[in-house]
Image (cartoon, rainbow, N blue to C red):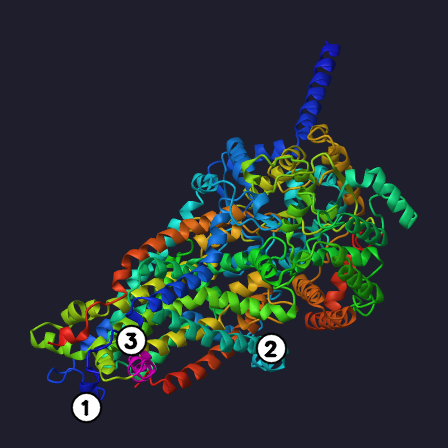
Amino acid sequence: MTPQRPLLRRPGPVLALRYAAALALTLFFIFPVYWLFIISFKTPAEIFHFPPVWYPESIQFANYRVLFKDGDAETVWNSLVLAGVSTVIAMILGTMAAYSLVRFKTGGENLAVWIISQRMMPPIAIVFPIFLLYVYFGWVDSYHGLIILYTAFSLPYVTWMMRGYIEDIPIELEESALVDGCTRWQVLWRVVFPMARTGLFATAVFTFVFAWNDFLFALVLTRTEVITYTVQVTHYFGGQSNFWAKIAAMSVLGTVPVFFTVATLQRYLVRGISMGAVKG
Amino acid sequence: MKMLRKLTLTAAAVMAVGWTAAAWAQSAAERAVNEAKKYSGTTITIVWEAGLQSLDPLHFSGPKWKELTGIDVKVVEVATAEMFTKIMQDYRSGAAAYDALNVIPAWMPDLANAGALEVLDPYVDKYGYRDELQKIAPTYRDNQMKVGDKIFGFPDDGDVFLMYYRKDVFEDAANKDAFKAKYGYDLAAPKTWKEFDDIGQFLTDKNQPNMYGAGFFRQPPYAMYMFQERFRNEGGKFFDAESMKATINSDVGVKVFTDMRNENKFMPPGVEQWGFVENLAAFLQGQTAMTISWPPYGRWAEGYGTDQEALNWVPKTQIAGKVGYALPPGGHPELAAGFALSVSSTSKNKDAAYLFIQWLNSEDISLQRVQLPYTLRDPFRTSHYTSPEYLSRWPNAKDYLGALKAGSETGLLDLSLLQTDKYEEVLRQSISKLWGGDDPKAILDQAASDWDAITDKIGVDKQKAVYQTWAAKSGAYPQ
Amino acid sequence: MAHTSTIAAGGAALAFPGHPPDRHFKWWIIAPAIFLLLFIGLFPLIYSLGVSFQHRTMLEDDKSFAGFLNYAQLFRDARLWQSLLHTAVITAIALPIELVLGMLMAQLFLERLPGRQVFVSLLVMPTVISPIVAGATWRLLFDNRYGPINQIIGWFAGKPVAALWTVKPDLVYPAIILCEIWQWTPFMFLILLAALSNVDKSLTEAAEIDGAGYWRIFVKIVLPAIWPVMAIALLIRGLDLVRIFDIIWALTQGGPGTMTETISIYTYVQGFQQFEVSYTAAVAFLVILMLTVIVTWAIRRMGLAK
């Protein structure tokens, strides 16, 4: 009996349906983003126009120029640096920790649960003691201070997510590498990290996003030197003012780099090789 | 010979007196600059509301101060909602990172009692500021400066609610005739809330959906100030002075709540969601004929400063030349929010910080600051209201300043007790319940009960003392 | 599953039979993470614990011992328990929707599709917009006068619709949940997509050849394969839902009244605005306790810590 092509890969009406569904979903998820982005091109009269304006009359980049001129755009850079560096460190340390938990059951259930419990602490309750800690160390308003903080906050997430992805890796691969004479350290870097690519990518995206989105700690732990994009954006919501165009332009500046990063790293998302090929 | 000696001595005496007089005739601004020069090279930090407000120290007063005295001003911008928190956290943690502060007067009792603010009287005397302090408009001067009998801040912003209305609509002959025919009195800026309801309904019936009779910022944080104003204008009292029981659920309160909700009906649909900018956009684009708000509306509606880049978020006014200014119905406007300049008690540069705020607040400099096109600081000194320079800024400016002056004389203070925010929070929630559709009496009964619980927790006697001090102020209740 | 053979046969500690377990290696690689977590996490925990037994409020930085005063207060605080209820409701509704929708989306994009790269990148966008900005944007979208949502509804209804999404008690929960799903379904989507891509295709293909239907394959082969990742994603998402703040704050500030006040908003108001430092610490420990119980139960049920 000739095997049928899998349902979802058949061309024709099914593909068309898939495409339609994809478009509809993208429309739903992107519409608010679109609305936000075009605000950066609208005049105030267009932003607060009745009925609502769906497309601005003209595309001009004055609002973006202002952000760069005034130095506000720098806050996007600050956020990128803080989130980026802390993500890289957290991915490395967290994956190592995950490997230890999965393959060696280090610390048993208790250690694993303790790690995830760090994410249960209500931020409001711990922000002031951390502020005290940072005042003591002199780390308030510093890059390294926030990087250390975000790394620590990301570790539970990275560790637990990578646990799941590492469990999916066939242990025979690591065993055969050991037989071939690799040290455990080399097994980790030469076998585990590459095999966990999809998981690393998916986890890294959101590790970055969580650090990127933080507001509370960036607010309390900075004053003037290291202002992040999330804090800067709140400066645009005044009691007697509302710089919507700046809010929108800043958001565009912030999301566009992330968009391109996700787009280019996507090949790690889908593993093309079938496991059967590796086993041979 | 004797004559010569006498003359010389007299001359010397006259010169000495004259020289001393000249020294004391120095303005407070000049004195501050001269005294501050010895701190040249240091840096002082000042906490300022982020966004539009902070353009003043960033672009004008900070650089100017540096130029005059050599002191660097580092502006720590903080969003309004977080200002109180950051100031308290800095104080409690011992970080001592702030020298000077912007403080909303309603917070002063809490901050002063916690010990976060420096008592300013010694500095005021040392640097001779008493005179110019006296010249701040009475309501701000007498009500937003002290906690107890000690000075903790200099009122620096004449925030007051004014009514803005479309003069052209009100002076239109057809409108006037039709209105008089229907209601029996002349169409003019409403003096009572009943008149407001009549006019609003009339104009909406005639002009909707292009224009509505009125629009307000109905979001709870803003509507709370409007409630405080209207409640007192209609005769309400917040507490019973003897028992310290809350009386916001009196008949007056219920009437105010009911009327507020009824008025939404002749306002643009969805007005319950409006904040500052939505309301501004509607008024400036000619969609509402009456509104109540802070002074900047009055300037921006006439196009003053809106060509500045900093104000490019303000919708272009379509009603320049058509704006009328009046006191809100009842005649006693809310001095909503406002700002005062203070010195942090943990500052390591108290004198330098103090001299900066004296300079900012002085007659000369404050006049320049309130006229900056992008400023949010509103006139607050008696001299501001009559300044020829300000009067020349736009054709209608004299009506604007006249209204502000009247407001400063009859204005009502924000409620200011221990832990004011807890009481305000109850009011905000009550307003959101009002828009949600609950029964006004039920809402206010719950609010009064919540207020009583808060008072009990703080200590009835303690709070009563603070309340009685507040209630004794000229701006606490309409006189 | 290929990898279960060794472990199932030998039990937990016998990974890599033939190679003696390296006692030091397993601790070395996890040490930096543990150190960092302790460094940042230990002091706040001890501090908060201490503070919860004191009298600290806005007015008085009173460090005197208060016994269980704050904890006793917890039980009398109706507003606290209501906020926990609101949080539970939002979590219980949003989490399953995000899971199912995310799964459907992942299935949709699993197989090749022209332009998939662009689609997936676009679909992740909602999570990257700062929650504060997202909340403010939705507030504008929902505005009756200046926002498009009521405009669109009006087109379908044929007449102007004045739905006050952020004000009316009937509409606030749908509005909040809609925003939340909009912002975080892409999270489940991407995680599940990565997990589904890892599923050994040879197994699914073999089953297809044997004539198994789509649903059977999904339940018997795919789900067990992605279960570890999916369960953890649910756990993480659930914990984050408990901490939901920005969207609600931007839309309703917990209103009308306290109808949409979640535990995060309540602790924010108490701890941040009103400086009830000691009481907030006690609330925090209550929350930690509750979450620990729930999470431990969940972990056992989901078989995550074998």
How far across and down, in percent of the image, does residue B139 sit?
Answer: 76, 46
Would you name the residue on which mark 1 appears?
A: C9
Q: Secondary structure at mark 2?
A: helix
Q: Secondary structure at mark 1?
A: helix
Name the quarter where the N terminus of chain C is drawn: bottom left
First-in-chain label (2 vs 1): 1
Q: How far separated are the C-alphas under marks 2 and 3?
A: 35 Å
Is C221 contained in the magenta span? yes
In magenta, the rendered stretch is C213-227
Name the quarter where the C terminus of chain C is drawn: bottom left
How far across and down, in percent of the image, does residue B110 sit?
Answer: 65, 60
Is A38 contained in the magenta span? no
Would you name the residue on which mark 2 appears?
A: C82
Q: How far separated are the C-alphas under marks 2 and 1?
A: 49 Å
Would you name the residue on which mark 3 appears?
A: A163
Label 2 chain ID = C
C274 and A172: which is toward the camera: A172
Q: Is residue B148 left or right of residue A248?
A: right
For label 3, count other residues whose C-alpha is less than 10 Å away and answer few (under 14), some (14-19) or many (20+): many
Q: Is residue B204 left or right of residue B23?
A: right
Contact flag, marks 3 and 1 (Cβ < 8 Å): no
Label 1 chain ID = C
Residue type at mark 1 is Ala
